[in-house]
């Protein structure tokens, strides 16, 4: 049986070396930030918090922990990595005083599609990542940290990512393997958590010893896997408070006052559960305070001899937030059903800081034009006065021209053959194509199979709209036994009919580089998760910024838009009514996109309906400032 084997990757291009490809992406990011850097104090004035300029400074930065960053050479292409990437780059653009901590992995799992022309499957080959120095990272001289693994002292160098300046830095510790190695409760996973948390905090301590920084303004934990950073801070504060039970109580009060936990996962059962042996050999051995050790031992005993990092994060953090208004509401409902109204004296209350995106990083041309026409201010936040009038005055022909340019870039990108479809073929995209996008991680709740629920209906829409081309991308987690068959169904469906093979294109290896080319070219964007299960949905923000009409269930950030501003998929989950709505709204959006004037009207309606405000990464950072320092 003949096989088609296709591996698409930014690091495996035959046209240029791996390191050149990575460095070119860094250069784009650096240029973007140089053009859009703004004064931190001016931004604080903009959000009405000028007093924070004296308490949130380069000497007292925010400390941010995340296990992944979707940046060149770091091997992370998931939604959490995209959020951390945008948070970091937006902070760089605003010159926000921040120390971002992460891990530099040496491997990543690529995505390959293997097929015989009829059946297709995802495979997950391991790929060596470039060494830190090869992608522009620089060694931080004079800073090495030690993290204990049982009785072993592991000494680690510290690298600084090349994007950023003295105010905003991304500091990385080398980690073995890939992002999230092995099973969630494995030793390898817990070791990476220890490297990030204890190692990251010890980098901060080294910088304090060198006189570079003082106590951080606050600690931001991006998901519960990073909680060991706050635990290390609690250990340090307990010692500073003189130890003993009183010192521990004072330190715990202090850490809760200055720690934010951002939650993305509504299902605590999906969290890792580590046993006492793992706790002792990866966590307890890194803690100095005997009082804190006793406290944690009691905590584990009370939690069924298991340590769940989400529960530890809820114990240590003083403020929790969901990443959209709906997500925050669902988090309260979900966690209160499990834990009650409070958790060890901490009220289970979630604020809502809806995720935004770094606008200039995903669509610099449209971002610049929106600033020029007074829709966005110099920080990338929609103007307070006359916003709707400014949107209405934005020229229709500019929207049309930007879309044509973006389709042209996508066409050239595909013609070079670096990203081929699942059949290994180069895609020849027509110049006047109406591009429909459906690209994100493959997971059960995202229902990536819905497009092919009624293949006859999809074929009819394609025949009646001959300019329509659909692009699908995204991979399933290597161990996701539910999502992988769903992806196989999608790939098999594309292969089942000639019109699908010609006009529905699956592109393996979804990453930032592909997103930056495909997103602006889309005239229609599809998003159909089960309602209540999508955390935020930032892919729709990226494409909506560039003028893609949104066809989506009312989930994540879409629940915050004016309902009439997008093509809402209505009906009960997986009901015939919902499938009817899906195909009806898809066809309606494609037909609207075929006429430049109608498309411009619909795009402006989307922007006025709240998309630009919600999508603004600067708005997101302002919301976190208010959350960290309540009035």
Image (tube, rainbow, N blue to C red):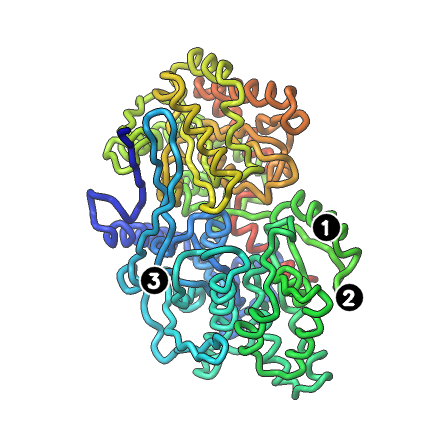
Task: Depth check: give the residue in front, 395 or 132.
Answer: 132
Left or right of 595? Residue 271 is: right
Q: Do callouts 2 and 3 mark residues in contact (Cβ within 8 Å)?
A: no
Q: State the residue at coordinates (55%, 33%).
A: 447
Pick whichever, 318 or 90, lies toward us.
Answer: 318
Residue at image location 52% in from the left, 46% down from the top: 616
Neighbourhood count class around disc 3 (C-alpha, 10 Å): few under 14, some 14–19, many 20 upward = some
Q: CA distance from mark 3 to mark 1?
A: 39 Å
Residue 320 in the image, given as x and y percentages of width and height: 66, 58
| Secondary structure of residue under mark 2 | loop
Callout 2: 10 Å neighbours few (<14), some, many (20+)?
few
Residue 409, relative to residue 43: is it above or below?
Answer: above
- SS at badge 3: loop
Q: Is residue 97 visible?
A: no
- The x and y percentages for residue 519 are 42, 36
User: Image quadrant for the N terminus?
Assistant: top left
Q: Quadrant of the C terminus?
A: bottom right
Reading the image, the residue beneath label 1 is 332
Residue at 26% x, 46% y is: 12
Q: x, y percentage for residue 341?
A: 79, 56
Residue 138 position, x and y percent, is: 32, 68
The residue lying toward the viewer, choosing from 599 and 516, is: 516
Q: Is residue 279 left or right of residue 440?
A: right
Residue labelled with disc 2: 345
Query: Mark 1, residues whose alpha carbon is within 10 Å: few (<14), some, or many (≥20)?
Result: many
Quadrant position of residue 122: top left
- Pick the front one: 52 or 517: 517
2 or 3: tag closer to the N-terminus = 3
Residue 521 visible in rendering: yes
- Disc assigned to residue 162: 3
């Amino acid at each position: 049986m003949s096989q088609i084997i296709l591996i698409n990757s930014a690091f495996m291009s035959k046209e240029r070396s791996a390191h050149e490809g990575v460095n070119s992406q860094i250069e784009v990011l650096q240029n973007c930030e140089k053009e859009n850097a703004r004064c931190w104090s001016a931004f604080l004035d903009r959000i009405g918090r000028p007093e924070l300029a004296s308490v949130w400074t380069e000497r007292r930065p925010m400390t941010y922990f995340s296990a992944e960053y979707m940046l060149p050479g770091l091997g992370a292409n998931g939604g959490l990595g995209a959020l951390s990437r945008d948070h970091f780059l937006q902070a760089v653009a605003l010159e926000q005083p921040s120390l971002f901590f992460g891990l530099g992995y040496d491997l990543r799992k690529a995505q390959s599609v293997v097929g015989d022309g009829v059946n297709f499957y995802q495979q997950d080959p391991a790929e060596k990542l470039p060494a830190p120095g090869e992608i522009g990272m620089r060694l931080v001289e004079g800073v090495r940290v030690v993290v204990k693994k049982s009785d072993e002292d592991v000494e680690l160098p510290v690298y600084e990512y090349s994007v950023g300046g003295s105010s905003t830095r991304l500091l990385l510790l080398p980690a073995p393997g890939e992002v999230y190695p092995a099973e969630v409760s494995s030793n390898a996973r817990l070791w990476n958590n220890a490297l990030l948390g204890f190692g990251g905090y010890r980098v901060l301590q080294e910088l304090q010893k060198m006189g570079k920084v003082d106590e951080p303004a606050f600690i931001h934990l991006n998901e519960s896997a990073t909680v060991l950073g706050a635990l290390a801070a609690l250990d340090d504060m307990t010692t500073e408070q003189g130890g003993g039970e009183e010192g521990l109580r004072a330190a715990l009060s202090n850490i809760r006052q200055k720690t934010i936990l951002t939650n993305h996962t509504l299902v605590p059962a999906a969290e890792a559960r580590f046993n006492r042996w793992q706790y002792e050999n990866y966590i307890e051995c890194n803690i100095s305070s005997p009082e804190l050790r006793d406290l944690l031992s009691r905590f584990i005993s009370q939690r069924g001899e298991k340590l769940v990092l989400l529960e530890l994060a809820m114990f240590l953090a003083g403020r929790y937030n969901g990443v959209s208004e709906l997500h925050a509401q669902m988090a309260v409902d979900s966690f209160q059903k499990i834990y009650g109204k409070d958790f060890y004296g901490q009220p289970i209350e979630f604020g809502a800081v809806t995720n935004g995106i770094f606008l200039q990083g995903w669509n610099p041309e449209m971002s610049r034009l929106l600033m020029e026409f007074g829709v966005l201010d110099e920080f990338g936040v929609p103007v307070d006065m006359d916003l709707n009038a400014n949107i209405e005055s934005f020229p229709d022909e500019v929207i049309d021209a930007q879309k044509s340019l973006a389709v042209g870039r996508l066409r050239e990108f595909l013609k070079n053959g670096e990203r081929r479809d699942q059949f290994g073929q180069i895609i020849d995209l027509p110049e006047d194509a109406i591009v429909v996008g459906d690209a994100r991680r493959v997971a059960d709740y995202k229902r990536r199979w819905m497009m092919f629920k009624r293949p006859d209906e999809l074929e009819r829409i394609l025949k009646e709209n001959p300019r329509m081309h659909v692009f699908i991308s995204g991979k399933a987690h290597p161990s996701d036994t539910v999502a992988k068959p769903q992806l196989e169904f999608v790939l098999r469906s594309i292969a089942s009919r000639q019109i699908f093979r010609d006009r529905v294109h699956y592109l393996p290896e979804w990453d930032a580089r592909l997103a930056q080319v495909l997103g602006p070219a889309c005239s229609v964007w599809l998003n159909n998760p089960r309602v209540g299960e999508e955390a935020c949905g930032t892919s729709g923000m990226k494409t909506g910024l560039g003028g893609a009409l949104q066809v989506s269930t009312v989930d994540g950030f879409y629940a915050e838009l004016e309902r009439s501003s997008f093509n809402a998929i209505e009906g009960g989950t997986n009901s015939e009514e919902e499938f009817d709505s899906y195909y009806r709204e898809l066809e309606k959006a494609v037909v609207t996109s075929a006429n430049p004037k109608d498309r411009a009207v619909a795009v402006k309606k989307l922007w006025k309906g709240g998309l630009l405000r919600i999508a603004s990464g600067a708005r997101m950072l302002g919301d976190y400032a208010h959350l960290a320092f309540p009035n």
